[in-house]
Amino acid sequence: MYQITNYTLKKAKELGVVVKPSTNPKKKIDVFKNGEKITSVGGAGYQDYPNYLKIDKELADKKRKLYKLRHKNNKGIAGFYADKLLW
């Protein structure tokens, strides 16, 4: 099960949402607004910015840049929250 980081909790608070470990085994977190589930985000088999930060800041910044380039056309709700909460 994915361990939600303080980074993600802080970002969720800024966005006015609540995050919990996902009930979908293929996802990292479920996002809730006003008590209702909005979406599940983050592929369970992939790293994210806060976890790369635990390894190396330079590596984390490089991975973040590459993620943002790969997903720049992601306009959906799940893509928005993945970007804001995990990257």
Image: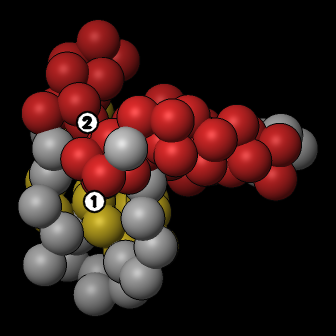
Percent position of residue 61, x then y? 56, 34
Q: Relative to residue 3, is residue 37 depicted above or below?
A: above
Residue type, label 2: Thr
Q: Nearer the viewer, mark 2 or mark 1?
A: 2
Tell me the crowding category of disc 2: few under 14, some 14 to 19, or many 20 or more residues within 10 angstroms, Cα based.
many
Q: Is residue 24 left or right of residue 40?
A: left
N-terminal of the two: label 2 or label 1? Answer: 2
**Which residue occupies 18% across, 69% down?**
2
> Which residue position is annotated with label 1?
29
Image quadrant in which you'd find residue 53: top left
Q: CA distance from mark 2 to mark 1?
A: 10 Å
Task: Residue lying at the far top in this picture: please name it.
Answer: 14
Q: Relative to residue 30, is residue 58 depicted above or below?
A: above
Q: Nearer the viewer, residue 56 or 50?
A: 56
Percent position of residue 19, x then y? 19, 44
Residue type, label 1: Ile
* Secondary element at tag 2: helix
Percent position of residue 51, x then y? 30, 52
Q: Is residue 51 left or right of residue 40?
A: left
> Which residue position is annotated with label 2?
8
**Which residue occupies 30% across, 23% down?**
11
* Secondary element at tag 1: strand
**Which residue occupies 83% across, 43% down?**
69
Image quadrant in which you'd find residue 49: top left
Q: Are marks 2 and 1 in contact (CB under 8 Å)?
A: yes
